[in-house]
């Protein structure tokens, strides 16, 4: 077998193996690395700022770039990765642009890009981690952030000499003149708009953290915290400088430089939280193996970190999605919740939208939950069918019992009793017939006696009336008396439900008949006990054993009857070791 | 070794974190696959996940008290290491002993497999119980039918014949009486005997109509229809069917006609019995007031009986639109 058999095996580290790298990714990796290297060298050559800021700033940019690339690699279809990798590169524009000052087109391009890095970062944070917008408003806000920053930071340099009162920049291709009389007011307006925008973005982010499921919140928190504290400060301070309210001072360099490093750390923390969860599926599986269906949703919500999670199975009978307690679940179509189908669309997980960026986690956890739920539903269905069949079987047996009792009563009242009276009437005829008639009468009376005996026998087979008259205990004594071997009967005097008494009677009758016919036993015993709603009938003999519980239809039929009443019949008949029949039948009181 | 690309750790407790992480991800994938797998694919999936193509999956076979593989062949468990049991009497994995160095992986893969296999085993067990209960229900019905037929036969051949003979004996006695009292006594006796005999015949027919056994369903149903108070047309396949099918069909029609006579206020009814492989379709319609209650004891008992033979009984009885009772009873070869 090849190495392929072990997924994720090999020399390279697993974080690398689990990623997917497109040509564009490689291009950005190399291009970005070159840019960062150039920037680092340039900064140290020019000594624009004290060295400690340069070190911190550059390290932060490199880290941010790396985190962006990792995110991109692990979630190739998620725009957040490229955005996270892009913004530190864009932030280099200010530093790198002067190298290209000999070329106006290059300089123009750099100026066009200047100032966008902040907007790209805001964009990344607002989309983190799913890469999807939550509402139209967010799209508007993001577009507005791009516009504000670009109009605010790039426009004066692109069209004019630069910011009023600052040293002039090189002229771009789009240079229109020295300055514009309204430029100061124009910049002030956009600076104020910038402050307003950042407040709106802060509000959006805080609201998301507050509303998010705990598991999602954990991932968002570092990023949002860094943004709300540090980035807000940077944005607002930049705007205040433009408005002339604040002035650059050296202490400002600390937060401005720390932005890179702390943003990288926050993004890394968020990314790690995203990655870590999938491992919990293994624990989920191990636990689902032990918990029962009611807890499946609970456990799933823990693994996904989303207390609002709903898991449902498709029910073909009801043509609906049903949750663990068989309640109907409607699938939200307005996009307010994430919807993930699992197991060939047999199951669905409805969860926080932010989990949509982890389809494999949701799929794996959902599949495990599906297995457990399906298990439960199938069992429930089979049990229901079983209960139905058992009930119907019990009804059949009880109906049969009633029918037999009715038959026996009809036979007695309409046939046996009248014939017995007839017998008495014929007795009155004796001595009142002639000589030839006398033997005839005797013959008729004899014949009637036989007929009555036969009917008696039949009636007894239909339903032993002795059960109604003497109860099971008495009926068992009668049975024992008719058996050729001595039978020791021990029974409780308590009356049992009619179907139970009938089943017990026929069981003992069949067993004693077998004792007489096949067992060559010298003695037998019958024991009847009734205890805590369970009747226990045991018939033993000391014969040759070897009775086959499946063979003679007699025992089989009795066993069916016993199990139709919810009981069990056990036959133990080792060759030479006698035969024991033990029936246990529940007696609902 | 083909499936171990990593050197086994010299300290089993101190596995690299990333290996543990990888294992957990692997299990997540396995669960997804098991969720979509067909029963026979479980072994392959586990083998692939553990990277051990020689892995064997044994399932506990209660009946023979042995382990069998997925093809049902008996599986000898090796006495060496590399045997991992899943659950109590459920399944066993026979694998390369070196996998024991990844106990967490083995445990979680085992759990995933157990979840999937337990589903199968439990269902198989429940299905078997269900099948057994169904069979036993069918046996109860068939046995009941048999007993009724025998009882009817016994009554007919035994008591009825004897009483008929008795009647002839009493007739012969008429010419041998000595006084009028005896004459009267004898006449009463003969009347009583006739009465008992007809009661017995009625009883026997209620137990099981002899005509059904002797002449088949078509004749029996025609006779039954003739006794109904309202006109009933009968259209019946003249062929003979297994006794329990004929009996159940007869009882279905009898119950339906009784209901029509007592509740339906119908002016006419029709009975149709057609053999549509593999079932006998028994249909009884009337033009009465409808609204029949399918949960009444008679119809429930009938549904139980038809269901016990693997058939179905349906009742369509909209108010004021007549009633249609349809039974489909399997006719096995």
Image (tube, coloured by chain):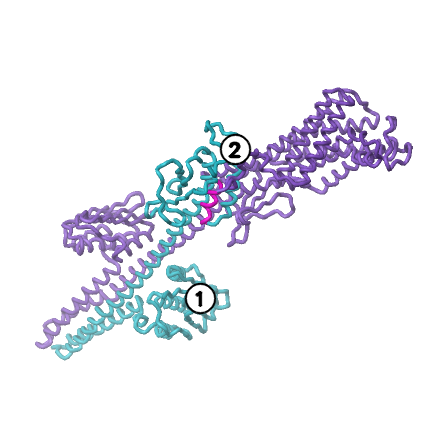
Q: Is residue A486 above or below residue A419?
A: above
Residue B90 in the image, given as x and y percentages of width and height: 39, 43
Residue closest to the eye, B124 or A134: B124
| Disc 2 target residue | B19
Whether residue A368 is visible here, answered yes or no, is no
Relative to A299, is A539 on the left or the right? left
Q: Which secondary structure type mostly characterizes the magenta part of the structure?
A: helix
Chain in cyan, by letter, is B
Name which residue lies at 46% across and 40% down: B52
Q: Which residues are magenta?
A: B39-49
The residue indicated by pointer 1 is B325
Discs 1 and 2 carry the same chain letter: yes
Q: Residue at x 32, y 71 (%)?
A: B212
Callout in the foreground (1, 2): 2
Q: Is residue B309 magenta?
A: no
Task: Say which mark, if any, is on residue B190.
Answer: none
Residue A148 percent location from the top left of the image? 79, 35
Residue B312 seen by the camera: yes
Residue found 76% across the figure and 26% down from its top: A42
Is residue B231 rendered to the left or right of residue A508?
right
Label 1: how many residues lie within 10 Å, few (<14), some (14-19) or many (20+)?
Answer: many
The image quadrant that residue A182 belongs to is: top right
Closest to the observer, B69 or B166: B69
Residue A430, image x, y percentages: 11, 71
The disc numbered 1 marks a residue on which chain? B
Q: Nearer the viewer, residue A491 or A148?
A: A148
Q: Chain of mark 2?
A: B
Chain represented in purple: A
First in sequence, mark 1 or 2: give its number: 2
Q: What element does badge 2 sit on?
A: helix
Q: Residue at x 21, y 68 (%)?
A: B158
The residues bearing labels 1 and 2 have C-alpha atoms spaced at a distance of 67 Å
């Amino acid at each position: 077998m090849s190495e392929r058999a072990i997924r994720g095996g090999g020399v390279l580290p697993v974080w690398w193996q689990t990623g997917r790298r497109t040509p564009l990714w490689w291009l950005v990796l190399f291009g970005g690395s070159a840019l960062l290297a150039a920037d680092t060298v340039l900064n140290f050559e020019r000594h624009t700022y004290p060295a400690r800021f340069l070190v911190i700033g550059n390290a932060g940019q490199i880290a941010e770039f790396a985190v962006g690339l990792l995110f991109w690699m692990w979630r190739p279809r998620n725009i957040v990765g490229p955005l996270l990798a892009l913004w530190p590169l864009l932030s280099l524009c200010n530093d790198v642009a002067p190298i290209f000052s000999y070329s106006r087109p290059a300089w123009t391009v750099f100026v066009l890009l200047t100032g966008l890095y902040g907007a790209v970062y805001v964009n990344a944070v607002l989309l983190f981690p799913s890469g999807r917008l939550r509402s139209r408003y967010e799209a508007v806000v993001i577009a507005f952030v791009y516009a504000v920053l670009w109009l605010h930071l790039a426009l004066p340099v692109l069209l004019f000499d630069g910011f009023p009162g600052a040293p002039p920049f090189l002229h771009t291709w789009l240079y229109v003149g020295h300055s514009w009389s309204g430029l100061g007011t124009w910049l002030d307006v956009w600076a104020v708009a910038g402050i307003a925008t950042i407040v709106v973005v802060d509000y959006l982010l805080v609201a998301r953290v507050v509303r998010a499921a705990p598991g999602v919140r954990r991932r968002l928190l570092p990023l949002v915290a860094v943004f709300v504290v540090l980035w807000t400060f940077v944005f607002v301070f930049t705007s205040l400088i433009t408005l002339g309210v604040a002035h650059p001072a050296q202490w400002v360099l600390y937060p401005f430089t720390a932005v890179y490093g702390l943003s990288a750390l926050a993004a890394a923390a968020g990314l790690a939280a995203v990655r870590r969860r999938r491992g919990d599926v293994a624990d989920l599986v191990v636990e689902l193996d032990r918990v029962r269906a009611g807890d499946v949703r609970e456990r799933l919500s823990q693994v996904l970190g989303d207390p609002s999670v709903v898991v449902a199975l498709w029910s073909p009978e009801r043509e609906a999605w049903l949750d663990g307690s068989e309640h109907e679940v409607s699938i939200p179509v307005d996009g307010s919740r994430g919807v993930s189908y699992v197991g060939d669309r047999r199951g669905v997980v409805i969860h926080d939208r932010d989990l949509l960026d982890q389809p494999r986690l949701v799929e794996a956890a959902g599949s495990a939950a599906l297995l457990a739920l399906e298990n439960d539903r199938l069992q429930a269905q089979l049990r229901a069918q079983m209960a139905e069949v058992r009930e119907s079987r019990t009804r059949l047996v009880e109906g049969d019992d009633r029918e037999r009792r009715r038959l026996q009563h009809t036979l007695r009242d309409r046939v046996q009793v009248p014939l017995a009276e007839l017998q008495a009437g014929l007795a009155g005829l004796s001595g009142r017939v002639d000589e030839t008639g006398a033997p005839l009468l005797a013959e008729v009376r004899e014949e009637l006696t036989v007929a009555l005996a036969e009917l008696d026998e039949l009636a007894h087979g239909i339903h032993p009336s002795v059960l109604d008259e003497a109860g099971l205990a008495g009926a068992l004594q009668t049975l024992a008396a008719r058996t050729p071997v001595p039978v020791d009967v021990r029974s409780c005097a308590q009356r049992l439900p009619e179907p139970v008494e009938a089943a017990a009677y026929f069981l003992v009758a069949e067993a004693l008949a077998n004792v007489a016919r096949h067992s060559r036993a010298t003695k037998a015993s019958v024991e009847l006990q009734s205890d805590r709603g369970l009747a226990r009938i045991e018939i033993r003999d000391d014969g040759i054993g070897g009775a086959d519980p499946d063979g003679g239809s007699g025992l089989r039929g009795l066993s069916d009857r016993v199990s139709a009443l919810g009981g069990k019949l056990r036959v133990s008949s080792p060759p030479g070791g006698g035969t024991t029949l033990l029936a246990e039948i529940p007696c609902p009181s | 070794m083909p499936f171990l690309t990593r050197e086994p750790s010299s300290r089993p407790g101190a596995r690299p974190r990333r290996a543990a992480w990888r294992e957990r991800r692997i299990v997540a994938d396995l669960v997804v696959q098991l969720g979509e797998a067909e029963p026979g694919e479980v072994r392959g999936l586990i083998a692939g996940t553990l990277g051990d193509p020689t892995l064997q999956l044994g399932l506990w076979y209660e009946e023979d008290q042995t382990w069998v593989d997925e093809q049902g062949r008996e599986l000898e468990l090796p006495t060496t290491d590399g045997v991992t049991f899943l659950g109590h009497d459920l399944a066993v994995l026979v694998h390369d002993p070196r996998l024991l160095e990844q106990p967490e992986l083995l445990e979680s893969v085992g759990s995933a497999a157990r979840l999937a296999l337990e589903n199968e085993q439990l269902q198989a067990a429940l299905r078997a119980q269900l099948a057994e209960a169904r069979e036993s229900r069918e046996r109860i019905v068939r046995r009941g039918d048999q007993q009724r037929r025998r009882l009817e036969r016994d009554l007919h051949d035994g008591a009825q014949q004897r009483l008929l003979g008795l009647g002839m004996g009493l007739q012969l006695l008429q010419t041998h009486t000595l006084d009028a009292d005896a004459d009267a006594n004898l006449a009463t006796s003969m009347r009583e005997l006739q009465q008992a005999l007809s009661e017995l015949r009625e009883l026997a027919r209620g137990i099981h109509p002899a005509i059904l056994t002797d002449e088949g369903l078509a004749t029996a149903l025609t006779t039954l229809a003739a006794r109904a108070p309202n006109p009933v047309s009968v259209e019946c396949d003249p062929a003979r069917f297994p006794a329990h099918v004929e009996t159940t069909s007869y009882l279905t029609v009898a119950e339906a006609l009784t209901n029509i006579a007592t509740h339906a206020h119908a002016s006419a009814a029709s009975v149709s019995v057609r053999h549509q492989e593999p079932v006998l379709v028994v249909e009884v319609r009337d033009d009465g007031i409808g609204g029949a209650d399918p949960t009444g004891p008679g119809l429930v008992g009938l549904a139980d009986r038809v269901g016990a033979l693997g058939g179905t009984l349906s009742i369509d009885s909209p108010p004021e639109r007549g009633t249609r009772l349809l039974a489909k009873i399997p006719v096995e070869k």
